[in-house]
Amino acid sequence: MSYLKIFYLILFISTYLLFFVFPARRSIIAILASIIILFIGIVSSYTTEIMSPIEIFNAINWNVMGIFVGMLFLADIFIDSRCPAFLATYLIHRRMSTSTALLIICILTSFISAFVENVATVLIIAPICFELAKRLKIDPRELIIGVAISSNLQGTATLIGDPPSMILAGYAHMNFLDFFFYHGKPSIFFAIQIGAMTSLTFLYFIFKKYKSEQEVEIESIKSWLPTFLLILLIILLATASFFEETLFTSAGFICIVISTFGLIWAKFFNKTSIIQTVKQLDWDTTFFLIGVFILVGTLNKSGWTNDIADLIYKYVGSNVIVIYITLIFISIVLSGFIDNVPYLATMLPITTILADKGGFNPTLLYFGLLIGSCLGGNITPIGASANIVGTGLLEKEGYPVSFLHWIKISIPFTLIAVIPSAIFVLLIYL
């Protein structure tokens, strides 16, 4: 084993540890690690372990980046249109029990997060939650926790819902419709809906203690156009699924084109500053994703992916069910404490090797990995970006959330969601 290979592993582990210790600086950490990898590639002579600058560029999945950045732009004008606020207040404007109103908010959050990135979804819904809590004179903590974990749940269901789904789609060459039916079988969307039905029932029992009734005024809407653009995006992504993938039919290209139309509309008809919109985007996560792709590419190039897969295969064996259950369990535990984006990106090539060694289709492991890593992020306040944003908003409003308070809701919710979803995938793809 060469010193350079050992160095790459140390760099990889150190970077992941720094992600955990300094989550607010994760993009800077990822980019610094990438610069080190690029420097080695420039100054060193080519070997089978060193990534050249061209290989580093190609390691970044630009289709995924196009999907992510395009959805950031579209989510921004969607929020500004006040359509989500209109939908939320419209659904609960009539006199109903508080518990029902709170559950409707979480259901709407789930629906929106299937098509809008989770952090954006929480930012859309949170102001409505705080206003509702003030009118009802209730503590908003349980509602905001419910909103955050509901957004993480449904963000897994579609290609455009959350970065891990985008990463899986890019890696496995899945299109938008593949998340609904994959090779003629019900796909991850339906697995998540089963988990949603059971977990949202749990949230209802959490909210059931609130007995009062309320009535909410309907928010006015500024424009329906961003909603129509989002619908058009979904139609185009579904249509593109029937064609061979090229640059012009790729999901990333479609997302960028539709979001560009949205920005032009916002500039000329809504008097929105494009420069200001660009500045406000989640560039932290964008550069973080780029850095993660480079780190994982280095791990693959240096041979560590194969070594890790060999180690897992040695101790877990070749039984697909055992590997599947182990993978989900490990993913839930780890994703509760580390960001699921680098974890999923790292584990996807490892699951492919495990499937090749065992002689079975990797789809089962892909979906198990996605379920475990995305839903496992719900367990702790730091397990997902939406959780961090939710707790941050609560602290800003004077409602700090303890670790114990969070897990009292999140652990039952996660288990109730994961178990039926995982069983569904196992029965369909075994």
Image (tube, rainbow, N blue to C red):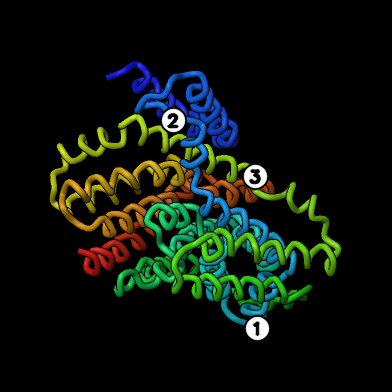
Residue occupying image coordinates x 49% and y 61%: 155
Q: Are marks 2 and 1 in contact (CB under 8 Å)?
A: no
- How many residues crowd around disc 2 within 10 Å: few (fewer than 14), some, or many (20 or more)? many
Q: Residue furthest bottom?
A: 94
Whichever of labels 2 and 1 marks the residue nearer the N terminus, that label is 2
Q: CA distance from mark 2 to mark 1?
A: 60 Å
Toward which corner of the image does residue 410 lie, by quadrant? bottom left
Relative to 185, residue 252 above or below = above
The local secondary structure at tag 2 comes to loop
Closer to the observer: label 3 or label 1?
3
Where does the image place residue 407, in percent across and percent down from the top left?
43, 49
Give the residue pinned by disc 2: 51
Query: Which mark, by number, is residue 94?
Result: 1
| Numbered disc in front, either 3 or 2 | 2
Quadrant in which the N terminus appears:
top left
Residue 283 disc label: 3
Asked which quadrant contains residue 197, the reply is bottom left
Residue at 48% x, 57% y is 152
Residue at the top extreme, as displayed: 3
Can residue 111 be seen by looking at this rendering? yes
What amino acid does circle 3 point to? Trp
